[in-house]
Amino acid sequence: MSKNFYRIFLAVLVFLGLGIVLLLTLESLKPEKTKQKPQKATRYVNAEKIVYKDYDAEIIASGRVMAIEQVSLSSEVQGKVFTGDVPLKKGAASRKGQVLARIVNEEVTYNLKSQKSRFLMSLANVLADLKLDFPDAYNEWQNFFNAVNVDDDLPALPEINNKQLKIFLSSRNVLGDYYSIKSFEERVDKHTIIAPFSGNFTQVNMQEGSVINPGAVIGTIINTSTYEVEVPVEKNEVKWLKKGQAVNVVPEERTADTLVGTIVRIAQFKDPQTQSIPVYVKIPSKAGQVYEGDYYSCLFKDIKVKNSMELPRSAVFNHNEIFLVQNSRLKKAVVNIVKINEKTLFFNGLKEGEFIVNEALLNANENMQVKIIDQAEKKQR
């Protein structure tokens, strides 16, 4: 190779080296950039000052209408069932005092008449002796004898004030026979079943002509004049209720007017199925409006919650913990829950004047820096 080539190559190397040195020198003269630390964003929260006052609260619960009086009509005698004043049909209505059914047993009827006939014979034999030994009592016993009729109940015995007369009648078994017949009449009366109240058949187990034995159930009737609603109430809510308290009762389908009921009983046990306390509300019956089996919503009013503050339930976590805002940072605190509503609750136990967060906070932790959203900021955001 020629000397000129080596000279050119060497000059290029020197030029590149000087260029690199110059570049490094200039780079070192530039001022160093200061690294800025990332700033933490301030979180905005809704909060309000704690102020305690008295509230008018309410409890809403639903329950089913039940008849206050429900009777199973059981037979105490044997015989054949016949219809009374109303048909033996489910849904048949009856009035108090009407005959619901008759249980006919002709053998019992004839037996009773036979006993009365023998009793008349005994009285006839006694009257002759009474006329001689107890003339003062004769007319009274003669009238009693004339009043006895084998087809009717025995009349009341004449009053016996004479001790000797009483011994005489007892020795002739007049008193024993009389009370034996009265006992039999009571049994015969059980063959007629009378309606104890105005109501409806809800179940009928026997048809006309059926033979029934003692203890068998003819049917079930309910009183349609008064009803009550069995309302399951949470255990922690029962303490706000008391017997005699007025209740607004409304059908769940909202097809009828609001009724005003009254708490008549508060159970002292917990229902194992609902884990609630049954409360019974008596309601008036209106024809064509209240039926057994209806579901009604009950509004328990006039509940006074004193010295408390209302807060959304969503702002409470871990059962009774909330966030306070102190010096622009979140602080956990425990509240005393007084009453729980559907969407809110009443609490106390914290110092008045502090700021409590009234909303649910996601991914929040204690000592997090926050700022309370005031009314002006709310309009801007």
Image (spheres, grey):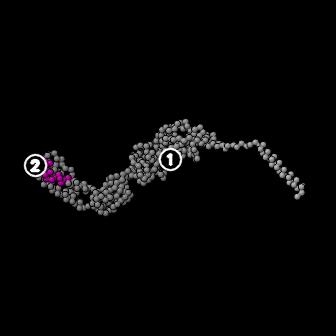
Q: Position of residue 324 (x, y in %)?
A: 56, 40
Which of the two marks, 2 or 1, is nearer to us in this view? 1
Of the residues shown, which amino acid type is indicated by label 1?
A: Glu
Range drawn in magenta: 164-179
The answer to whether 54 appears left or right of 158 in the picture is right
Identified at 50% across, 39% down, the residue is: 348
Please say if the residues under marks 2 and 1 sit with CB atoms less than 8 Å apart. Answer: no
Question: In the figure, 376 relative to 152: above or below?
Answer: above
The answer to whether 43 appears left or right of 254 in the picture is right
Mark 2 neighbour class, 10 Å CA radius: few under 14, some 14 to 19, many 20 or more: some
Tell which of 299 and 139 is nearer to you: 299
Residue, disc 2? 133
Residue, disc 1? 342
Q: Position of residue 97 (x, y in %)?
A: 32, 53
Q: Distance from label 2 to label 1 (Cα)?
A: 88 Å
| Quarter that holds the C terminus | top right
Identified at 14% across, 45% down, the residue is: 162
Query: Is the stretch drawn in magenta largely helix, strand or loop?
Result: helix
Q: Residue furthest left?
A: 132
Tell which of 138 and 370 is nearer to you: 370
* Secondary element type, mark 2: helix
Of the residues shown, which amino acid type is indicated by label 2?
A: Asp
Q: Position of residue 192 (x, y in %)?
A: 29, 57
Identified at 31% across, 63% down, the residue is: 210
Tell which of 169 and 157 is nearer to you: 169
* Secondary element type, mark 1: loop
Which quadrant of the view contains residue 35? top right
Is residue 306 something that shows in the picture?
Answer: yes
The answer to whether 34 appears left or right of 304 in the picture is right
